[in-house]
Image (spheres, helix red, strand yellow):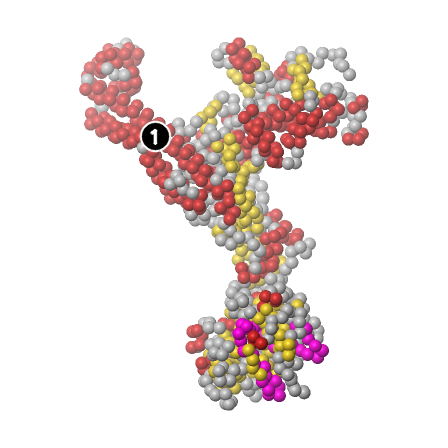
Amino acid sequence: MADERNIGTVLTRNLQEEMQTSYMEYAMSVIISRALPDVRDGLKPVQRRILYAMQRAGATSGSRYRKCAAFVGDVLKLYHPHGDTPVYDALVRMAQTFSLRYPLIDGQGNFGSVDGDPPAAMRYTEARLAAITGELMADIEKQTVDMIPNYDGSDEEPTVLPARIPNLLINGATGIAVGMTTNIPPHNLREIAAGVKHLIDNPEATGEDLLSFVKGPDFPTGGLIMGTAGIKAAYSTGHGRIVVRARHTFEQAKNGRERIIIDELPYAVNKATLVAKIAELTNDRKLEGIANLSDESDRSGMRVVIELKREAQVYTVLNNLYKHTALQQSFGVIMLAIVEGRPVVLSLKQALQLFIDHRRDVVVRRTKFDLDKAQERAHILEGLKICLDHLDEVIKTIRAASDTETAANQLQTKFGLSERQARAVLALTLGRLTRLERHKIDEEYEEVIKTIAYLESILASDRKVRQLIKDEMDDVTKKYGDDRRTEISEQEATELSAEDLVHKEDVVVTLTHRGYVKRQPQRVFRAQKRGGVGLKGARPTAGGEAPSGTREEDYAEHLLTTHTHASILFFTQSGRVFQLRVHEVPERERQAKGVPINNLIDVGGNERVTAVFIRPESETEAHYMLMVTKNGYIKKTALREYANVRRNGLIAINLQEGDELDWVTPTSGKDEIIIATTLGKAIRFGESEVRAMGRDTQGVIGIKLGKGDTVAGMGTVTGEGDVLVVTERGYGKRTPVAEYPMHHRAGEEVLIISASGMVLRTPVGAISQIGRQTQGVIVMRLTAEDPGVVAIAPVGAIEEGDGKE
Amino acid sequence: MGAGIGDNFNIEKMRYHRIVSMTDADVDGSHIRTLLLTFFFRHFPEVIDRGYLYMAQPPLYKVSKGKQVVWCRSEADRERALKQLGKNAEVQRMKGLGEMNANELWDTTMNPETRVLLRVQVDDAAAANEIFEKLMGPEVEPRKKFIQAHAKSVRNLDI
């Protein structure tokens, strides 16, 4: 094994030490001078070098565009001895309007897209600095920042830019170092500037105070931030999770299908990938309800169209899209930046404060620089003034001198000039020297002295420095400030419920005898005067044309006035209960027949819906559900027992053989109940007499029926208000409950639906209050073949103006 | 290397008794070196145990004045060279092997007469294993802690 040959000097190196040293050199280099931005100017070294190289090359905002390849070459040559590709990539990113909130480079040509299309090669694209980048560079020539030798000592580069704009926060940063990463979201310049100003005036301001100025991230791509908890966490601790959603609108396609139009995406989401993902999930049946997907984006804007299947629920589809695709993304904030050569996780306040400290530093250094210049000028002007006092002698002295050196010495000794003054005088041509005008010199001198006083006053007063920083903040805000693009929703990113997406609208839901259900906006029913014929509802047609209206011999049996956010409970004669959201009932034209109820809920073939009502929205409205069966059983169950009724149903009451559940009503616990029978008997009692039971019970006897008798109807009364009774022939009457309480209570208006499907909405007041032994007045004129009124329902106090139409 | 890998590895079949890693003399070179060392430590520990693994030492600086050139492997070397060549000497920080001509590479790094090789040696196998686990393992947190603990000890930073 031992080698005979000379292999040169061999030293040993401990593996562990070598690993540690080499790894740490690499890690710290990446952390400090590669992947993380400086807190002061928000730039990583490569970015700073690109901007500085472009500035040095004169590619400022007013200049013409020049080839990116040239800038990349400059950067490699002068400052950044690394690969050209990363340099060009960094340059491109700074020009992308979807990557930077305030792009620092103004690009000409193809700089890539939100679809992840690559930019054109650097030999094609051109660039110059954006106007706002001038603010990053402002005053750099006034020794405001430290310069260090470049990698080969041939030039100098700035360690940081003067940064009149809070670039770290407005443009954000992302970077993966070693063992740590940074992810700072972009912000709105106006908000950050307001935060900066507030913190200058109130150094003790809390994070909470700052939140009233800085509302949250503001992404170049817009979108919607869900909730403020993540923002608060991020700003107070430097870590937080912010959920961002795409922004969408809804459209109705010509074919009647609902469309979701996406026009803004969460930050840094690749649209092409997203669309492909949605398509893939749809094809794999992981996303249901999507009929069609197309990306109609073009140069004018983004437009991704998701067309839904007819039966799909918009909110379900959106929920699934949020859950499974980048339509919802969480932005993990890590406010990590380099502070004095160390990586530090910062709170918002710290980040703002460090920016302010940097600005103070820059303003002071700039003022000192200007002061030096002014003092130098004052000194020269003083020299010139002395020369003017002795102009002829001065000229003579200069002429007499054999060379410049002698002349300078002579001027110094004869007139008491300093060397700098002497040289300044000598730099003037004879012509200019003789033409020097005293008053001009005096004027300039006075001006310079004033400037000096002003500059000295700044240096003497931190208050003035602070004011300057604020003024400059105002200045950049005025020039570059713009409106926020990302909306911040107070609502956290919980799953969407129907209420979030379904427009709350007053609607009428009808269910026909044969089980066809539909909903219509309440506004389609204009209030008509008493005696109006009503509008055509679902009209039974002659045999064969059934699909266009209510089926032959079908008639509307249940009528509910409600709104789209409510829930409907359906009870069947076999004692089961089902629940549907009102918006889940398909909206149909007034004259359409609706959809079979068994398409929406799991009713069996022999099951018939016998009672339908709107689920009370709170327990203050109703505590119980009261059920009455054909054979006179009554049962009361607490409403909360029905909290989780689904489309597939639950048992509401256990029925004896041959019995049917025909009536259900919500009650308060203090109502009175009236049960009437087909043979004309009636009973009235307080509901407190009926003990509340669980769902899966059969209840108690409510009325003892004689032979052949069955329950004909039931109602609850509260003892106040009027009762409206409408007969099958369209007669109606209103009677105070106290006098003869029975059946439905009336609201301000009632909707009346006849067996032949005519619908009438009329104010209750139009029906005169009459005694109970009367026939009543005609509320709705029925055509001869109309079998009669089958349902009435109160209309809430809505659209009062309608009553006058 | 002719010795196979994994279960089939047989150190006796090694065709070479000197495996020399030669990476750029900058921090990225350091990184690559750590990756190569990890590769050998994990898959060919015997290569290290037997002392077959070496690291070449390319120069860090080229100090030149006119035709005089001095290659330096450390800061101290550079200071010495600067004194030797006097004022106006040019210093070039050597960052990549590609900066050198073939003959320069031979002179500085490969020629047995002039080069210095470092033989990789494991003094404490357990400690070595631990550091590989920390620096190259799947867990980020220990790595972060390690970096924070040793941040101050870094001397050669690439700025």
Q: Chain of mark 1?
A: A
> Mark 1: which amino acid?
Thr
Give the class, few, some or many, for how many residues have Cα within 10 Å of label 1's Cα (few <14, many ≥20): many
| Residue B158 place in picture, x, y as percent | 55, 26
In front here: A694 or A328? A694
Q: Is A76 in front, or is A277?
A: A277
Secondary element at image label 1: helix
Residue for point 48% across, 76% down: A747
Residue appearing at x 38%, y 42% in the figure:
A198
Q: Is residue A655 magenta-colored?
A: yes
- Classify B158 as above or below A260: above
- In the image, the segment drawn in magenta is A653-682
Residue A109 located left or right of residue B18: left
Q: For the N terminus of chain A, give its image quadrant.
A: top right
Position in image of residue A544 (x %, y %): 66, 79
The answer to which image quadrant residue A294 occupies is bottom right
Quick one: A194 or A157, which is closer to the camera?
A194
Up/down of B133 relative to A524, above or below: above
Taking the spot 41% from the left edge, 30% from the top edge, the residue there is A140
Residue A267's place in the image compared with A794, above or below, is above
Magenta stretch holds residue A469: no
- The number of numbered badges drawn on the structure is 1
Is residue A426 at all visible to an observer of this figure? Answer: no
- Where residue B50 appears, as percent x and y from the top left, is 74, 20
- Give the percent coordinates (x, y) of residue A245: 54, 51
Q: Give the residue drawn at x 71%, y 27%.
A: B40
Read off the residue under disc 1. A367
Res A176 → quadrant = top right
Quadrant occupied by the C terminus of chain A: bottom left
Is residue A652 at all visible to an observer of this figure? yes
